[in-house]
Image (tube, grey):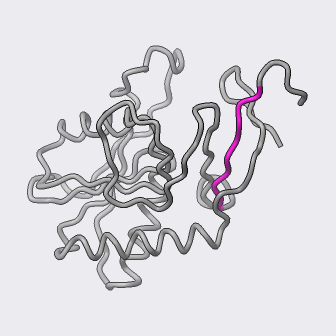
Amino acid sequence: MTKTAGNQRFRYKRTVLDERDISRTIRRMAGQLIEQHDDLESLLLIGIHTRGVPLAERLRDEIQKLEGVEVALGTLDITLYRDDLSTIAPQPVIKGTQFPVVDLDDRVVVLADDVLYTGRTVRAALDELTDYGRPKAVRLAVLIDRGHRELPIQADVIGKTLPTARSETVEVAFKGTDGEDCVRLFERQSDGDAA
C-alpha cells in the first residue's frame, strides 16, 4: 500500500492503532481529562480541523458516558493562521471556526488534534484562539505525539507517544471522516524505490 502527499510517495510500514486500540486510547484520554479538571462544565473542547474535530467529539462522548456531563464542543480552522500559508495551495479551503459560547474568559480550553509533530499547528491554533478571548487556561490533547518539535509545545494528554523518523508520516483515520478508525505509519519512498 502506498499513498501520495504533494509530490512525494509513501510506502505503508505498519498499523500502529486499530479500531479497538483507538477506542481504548480515547477512553483513557477522557479519563485523564476528567482527573485533571474538577469543573467539567467550564471545559471547552475545541477540535482543530480536520481530524482534531472527530477526536474532540469522541472525547466529549466518553466524558459524558463516564461522568454524565456534556462538555461544550467547538471547532477551530487554523488555515489563515499558518506560517506556511503561501506554500500550501493557491486557494486554501476554509472550514470555519465555531464556538458554542461567546466568552472564552473563565473557560478551560482543551485543544484536540490528531498528531503533534513540529508544534506549528498548535502555535497557529493558539494565535487564533487569542483573537476570540483570553481563556482561563489552554490545554492540549493529542492522539499521537510523534516528536520532532520545532517549537516549545507539549501536550497535556497524549494517547500514544510514537517515536518516528522525519522520513516517516503518521496517518490517522476516524470513522466519521474516513470510514474507519486506525493509525498507520508510512515511510517516504526515494526515487530508486520500486512501487
Q: Is residue 57 magenta?
A: no
Q: Residue at x 74, y 52 (%)?
A: 14
User: Observer-nearest residue: 113 or 161?
Assistant: 161
46 relative position to 51: left or right: left
Which residues, given as a range, are shown in magenta? 181-189
158 relative position to 5: left or right: left
186 relative position to 91: left or right: right
Q: Quadrant of residue 190?
A: top right
Q: Is residue 182 magenta?
A: yes
Q: Position of residue 64 (x, y in %)?
A: 37, 79
Q: In which quarter of the image is residue 36?
A: bottom left
User: Observer-nearest residue: 32 or 152?
Assistant: 152
Q: How many labels does the image show?
A: 0
Q: Where is residue 94 in the image (x, y as percent from the top left)?
A: 44, 33
Depicted 101 relative to depicted 98: above or below: below
User: Observer-nearest residue: 188 or 104?
Assistant: 188
The C terminus appears in which quarter of the rendering?
Answer: top right
Depicted 103 relative to depicted 22: above or below: above
**In the displayed image of the protein, which residue is found farthest to the right?**
194
Q: Residue at x 80, y 38 (%)?
A: 2
Q: Where is residue 20 in the image (x, y as percent from the top left)?
A: 64, 73
Q: Can residue 103 be seen in this view?
A: no
Depicted 7 relative to depicted 40: above or below: above
Q: Quadrant of residue 8?
A: top right
The N terminus appears in which quarter of the rendering?
Answer: top right
Main secondary structure of the magenta stretch: strand
User: Observer-nearest residue: 131 or 121?
Assistant: 121
Q: Which residue is drawn at 71% across and 56% down?
A: 15
Q: Can residue 25 be seen in this view?
A: yes
